[in-house]
Image: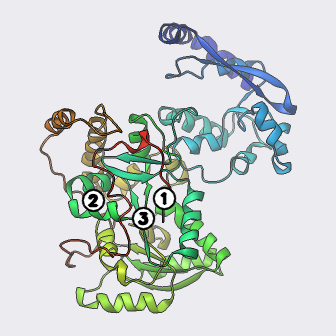
Amino acid sequence: MDRAVAGLTLALLFPVLLVRAVIAYLSTGQVFESEDLFGRSGAPFTVRTFADGGLCSRLPHLVAVCCGHLRFVGPRPLTSDEIGRLSSRERWRLKVTPGMFSLHRLRAATGIAYDPEHHLDQEHVQEQHLLTKKNLGIVLRSLLVHGVSTDPQQERPGEFSLLGVHISNFTMSQALDWIQEQVRTATTARLICFVNPACLNTAVEDQQYRDVLDGSDLILPDGIGIKIASQIHGFTVQENVNGTDLFPRLCRRAVAEGISLYLLGARPGVAAQAAEEMRRRFPELLIAGTRSGYFAPEEEPQVIEEINASGAEILLVAMGAPRQELWLARVLPSLQVRVAMGVGGLFDFYSGRIPRAPLWVREIGMEWVWRLGQEPQRMWRRYLVGNPLFLYRVWQDRAPTTGKGHPSETEQVNADALVPDVTVSLPPTDMSPHHWELPDRPVADPSRPIRRRDVRPGQVAHHGAARRVGR
């Protein structure tokens, strides 16, 4: 079946193949780039890709499907180096025909391939027939996300800058390792911030929030918008390290290491429901305490005392950005936890109050559309206005640089002149109480040096050497 479909597709798309071949030749001076790979039983074969790497560059792979070297859906074919490094639990890959598309490559395209490749792709060992619901879905979703797929040769810096905010390009596993290390070694509380396009828009307009981000210990990329923005700048984000996907993995790690958590925020009862759900999934999980985010300013000392008395090592705060980050920055010197992070609407998802987008929606990078459909009155400005505004700002931020990545004064003036005088007030990411009094400025602990402030606004961090994150 795969061979017949591939042959028919090649015949129907023959004019497209001719046009693509001409474009590739005019762009690079050659039509194809060849790669030697290994398939079932370690049999060698060659695949050809259009040399310019543009749209539909992998269409010639259909020839390998016609020849039986590939199927449409299956694990990724291996290189000679990878063949030699296969572990015993990965040898199954030599018993199946590799594919043009796979579940791991689909999720990697949108940054949510958190599990090892051999775990995800092993699902295709038993069933590789194209005309199954699962495999047709993988092919269709893979075609939908083709535009955001990452070039393997694209730069993956250890840290990068978007709109002047310096973000650590961690994988989910690296983020968990960092948290675990801070719990083990930190003597003062460390602050983690997750940033998505709405957060970066807010950071442009809110200096108070920008100062908190500059003073944080770790900033992680959240959402498909950050990945698209990175590609506009010519590099790639490794993974979408959002708090919602991190939470269950953090709980699993906490069980293994005996780490306790405190959940603060959301509506009354929601944090407790989220804690109960995670205890159901991980019976040995240590939840030191929970409390809603609705408390008066005069109750704040009591809240801090409860958190400290609980002995929790990690504090998750769900008050919506930027409120949660501003609050954490102000009270961090008084907290005795090792790691604190703002997690937006996370408790709502895990308590069941708000259903999260199905996995297939997240696989194509459309979770924001799902959220818009759930709460259109609250979310329309954030997504329908905020997302285009963010991409416009990122596009403008591609100004030529001089020296070590600093825009020249003339370039900066010209770039500033192009920015429209628009202020967009984006709603918080969670249903936060609005009666709180925010501090005039976040109070920093003098013993905690600000890690990011030695970087001038506008510096393009991904052109320089990656700095080690944390202290």
Looking at the image, residue 466 sits to the left or right of residue 419; the answer is: right
- On screen, residue 117 versus residue 21, left or right, reads right
Q: Is residue 126 above or below residue 219?
A: above
Q: Mark 2 and mark 3: span between their CA atoms?
A: 13 Å
CB under 8 Å between callouts 3 and 1?
yes
Dot 3 or dot 1, earlier in sequence: 3
Residue 434, located in which quarter of the rendered image? bottom left
What residue sits right under mark 1 in the picture? 469
The amino acid type, in three-letter code, at marker 2 is Arg
Identify the residue shown where x is 51% and y is 12%: 28
- Asked if residue 353 can be seen in this view, the reply is no
Q: CA distance from mark 2 to mark 1?
A: 18 Å
Quarter residue 213 falls in: bottom left
- Give the residue at x 36% y 58%: 452
Q: Is disc 2 placed on a helix, strand or loop?
A: helix
For label 1, the crowd category at 10 Å Cα-Cα, with few meaning under 14, some 14 to 19 and many 20 or more, is some
Type of residue at label 3?
Asp
Q: Residue at x 44, y 88 (%)?
A: 308
Residue 127 image offset from top left, x and y in percent? 77, 41
- Which residue corresponds to mark 2? 210
Mark carried by residue 217? 3
- Picture quarter containing residue 281? bottom right
- The relative height of residue 287 versus residue 26 in the rendered view (above or below) is below
